[in-house]
Image: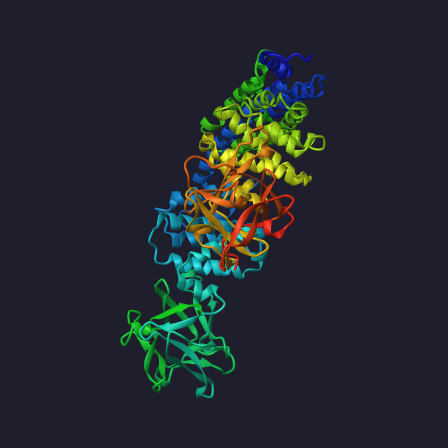
Amino acid sequence: MTSVRVSRAFLIFVVCINFIKCTVSADCNDHLRTCYSDVWGDIRYEKSGDANKAMDFYKEIESEIQHLNQLSNNVRRFIQQKKAEMLSNSLTGEGNDISSAVKTLSKNQEISLTEDILYDAINEVFNAQTPSKLVDLIWKIFQANERESFELMVRTQLMLFRVYEDRKKIDQQYPKKIVYYLYKILKHPLYAGLEKALKARLEKALARLPLAYKALLFEPLFCLMSVAHNEYIYTALEAKLDSQNRFLWVWYEKDFIDDSGHIKAELIEPSNGNAFDFKVKLTGVTFNLPYHRLDYHQFAIAGWQGLGEPENYDWDFQVVDNDVIVFEQDGFTMCIGDNQDTERRNVYGFMDNEHTAKDAICQWKIGSFVMTNTRVNRVFIIFVVCISFIKCTVSADCNDQIRMCYSDVWNDIEYEKSEDTNKAMDFYKKIQSQTRHLNQLNNNVRRFIQEKNAKTLSKSLTGDGNEIRSAVKTLSKNQEISLTEDILYYALNEVFDAQTPSKLVDILWKIFQADEPESFELMLRAQLVLFRVYEDRQKIDQLYPKKIAYYFYKFLKHPLYSGLDNALKVRLDNAIARLPNDYKALLFRPVFCLMNVAYEEYIYTAIQAKLDPENRFIWVSHKKKYIDDAGHIKAEIIEPSNGHALDFKVKLIGVKFNLPYHRLDYHQFAIGGWQGYGQPENYDWDFQFVDDDVIVFKQNGFTMCVGDNQDMERRNVYGFMDNEHTAKDAICQWKIGTCDRR
């Protein structure tokens, strides 16, 4: 290729020249990659290095990636639909083939696709199968001590839980069953090997269970408070019912119990294998005594401290409200009985003809304290994928041909009568492979464009930068913003050693053409990129902070600012937040106050006292480190008459009475608050920062300093000539910022 920019037709010719060699045995992906590789080689290694050719090629690749992503999504939906239909058949009846079905569908397949298939399949059968039936079927996926099937079962249970929540189907048995299975998952040795993200999802599912289940089985310990009396059950510290049993009582104090009331629960496997019938063992933590029901002493509930396991320690339970639970056992319910004394109540097992789960004395608030067809071989897929390429000519476009090729394959798969999804899965993987290749090539072309354009742009950033406007507009034309900003970043880094930041900041301002929104936005982006380079490189330039503060101020005040997108405004706000504190206080806060360094007293506008009919006194109050709103000041930029950003000055205004601070040419050059007509003289203040938050105000050889006392409570403020006081004197230095430093 020559250095003259080739037309798009010629580029397409080069792009597709290799396709005339295609045969039915070729692979789409291999040919497209070879084609693109040749084009990329021609562009990259030609002497002219024309970035415009690269940009055309870059857009070709971007277009192809978008097409492949869309096609990939279509194929993915097809696989998802077909496999979900197959899996739903395994979720009916007794589900004896569920394990092999789930393993088959997940083989060589991304996890997210597997979970989407599971979700669709469960939704498909949700009306025909109850959640409590499905939760049992899904457990069958797990084959003993097989890590892969354990993980698949966990993912499937989480999908069912999600569908259950989405569909809000009432099933009284499901909550207890899923609690049982989640408990077993957490206690299983294979749980430790699950990835963190899956564990986190499991924990989130636990967090959405009814509070009673969470407290009973998934908290280290809990307490039980009687609904009837708001009093807690506990294990007696010393009192024994007999030699093998310690009393369990309910303590009279309301809404509180110490550690003698701490309980933990352990799951007891159901003897009949039905998850719904699992029971729990309740153990008083302090003395490690199981709660059990005696067959004597009025069926009292006691803490067993004998040898071995007691009788009647396996408790069934039912949740009657979010955090209210009832414990039952062989026709008995654990309830509060008569008083032991004035401070304690007994706990018994009452038969159903005496008390039931509906009675408040038997209810306890629980909580912490506080495809069947033969699979076609890969050769046939490749044949189908590439059959269209025998029609390629030199006038064809790579992207059009590959899309036609893929479209034909997709139509064959989508509309054939076979239920076999293996063809679709092979095709899906092929598209993903092609997308990855194009993304990599896309990144290489992007870097090439970035490098070439950055070198071109860097030439415009030397000297006076008079070409910068047209250069930036040209590089940004028909180009994504992020690429433009990357080019700016590299170009600015390229010239950063030769040009000072304070020089570059002025050059970048030239990008802006009056009242042109596009150039205003480009200039702002360029300034933000320079600010980033300045921070990254940490180059010392005393002039840059004042200049960039000036330009940032002008951005905010410009009418075109309101039309910028919110993300760009946020970036500007973040940059302003990283300016030195002095500039932020002076120019970017609604008000500030000035405290004299020598006296730690604030300047303010006199409430009533006038120096003469047109001027109100400006004083420093004797009150240390604090001033009220009479000391509130704001600053406005005064544009530099010579056009140099560094030479801008500020107008200081006492906010309470809206009076500008100015220096009089009489009365010892006093500083007054102007309340006459028009603008006063000597109101334009130059300034310099002598420390992070210490500022000095100067004007035509005068410095604003504290002078003599007006009286016992106030000091006068004057403009002192340089032969009297200077910026080095503490009486002329002002801490800028907050109005209260106490």
Q: Is residue 609 above or below residue 370?
A: above
Q: Is residue 82 above or below residue 162?
A: above
Q: Is residue 566 in view?
A: yes
**Of 241 and 5, which appears nearest the observer?**
5
Q: Position of residue 44 (x, y in %)?
A: 69, 21
Q: Position of residue 347 (x, y in %)?
A: 36, 79
Q: Is residue 434 in view?
A: no
Colour convention of the picture: rainbow
Q: Position of residue 173 (x, y in %)?
A: 37, 58
**Residue 682 falls left or right of residue 333:** right
Q: Is residue 619 above or below residue 565?
A: below
Q: Quadrant of residue 274?
A: bottom left
Q: How many marks?
A: 0
Q: Quadrant of residue 171?
A: bottom left
**Of 698 and 99, which appears nearest the observer?**
698
Could you tell me which quadrant the N terminus lies in?
top right
Q: Position of residue 570 (x, y in %)?
A: 50, 39
